[in-house]
Amino acid sequence: MDRLLSVLSYKYLGSIIDNRLNFNMNVEKMCRKGLQCIHCLQKLSHFHVDKTLVALFYKSYVESVLTFSLICWYGNTSIKARKTLSKTVKMCSKVMGVPVQLSYNLYSRQVVRKAHTILSDCAHPLHSEFWLLPSGSGFGKGKGTLLLVTYTVYSEM
């Protein structure tokens, strides 16, 4: 007979999930990778690379590392972990000398984009579960457990 092992954390599809489903270890991993990326940004600044190219490097490499599967784990992280992630993003901005979007703004943008994708695909299983409000500023809830209001995700128990 097979037995299930209890573990403190598990890496699944590139994201670390701990036994409390709060993804704080995942944020720590993302921030460590972000610090390595900051080193690359510092080198680019040291070589006096044009700021538009540095910003392009940030958007294409650093931001993609920091926001990998963001829509899945950001909502279940602690405030401390979110501040750590924001601190890493702010350090990148300081090194580049160019303002960048904070992690919450990126998360909100991804949630809205995913919701619009679901609404435009009639075959999607969640298509009937919510709809765009007449004001256009949020989403109404159906019978499911997903509620999107003013571009923020809430889950009901």
Image (cartoon, grey):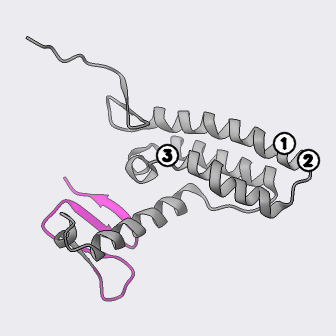
Specify few, some or many for label 1: CA neighbours under 10 Å numbering under 14, 14-19, or 20 or more. Answer: few
Q: Does the stretch in magenta take in 148?
A: yes
Q: Residue furthest left?
A: 1
Q: Which residue is mark 2?
A: 47
Residue visible at 31% across and 68% down?
148
Q: Secondary structure at mark 3?
A: helix
Specify few, some or many for label 2: CA neighbours under 10 Å numbering under 14, 14-19, or 20 or more. Answer: few
Residue visible at 65% across and 46% down?
87
Q: Nearer the viewer, residue 8 or 34?
A: 34
Q: Does the stretch in magenta take in 151?
A: yes
Q: Which is more N-terminal, label 1 or label 3?
A: 1
Q: Which residue is mark 3?
A: 79
Q: Which residues are magenta?
A: 132-157
Q: Which residue is mark 1?
A: 43
**Callouts 3 and 1 close, C-beta under 8 Å:** no
Question: From the viewer's perspective, is residue 30 above or below residue 47?
Answer: above
Residue 24 is tagged as none
Q: Would residue 68 appear left or right of 5 to someone viewing this image?
A: right
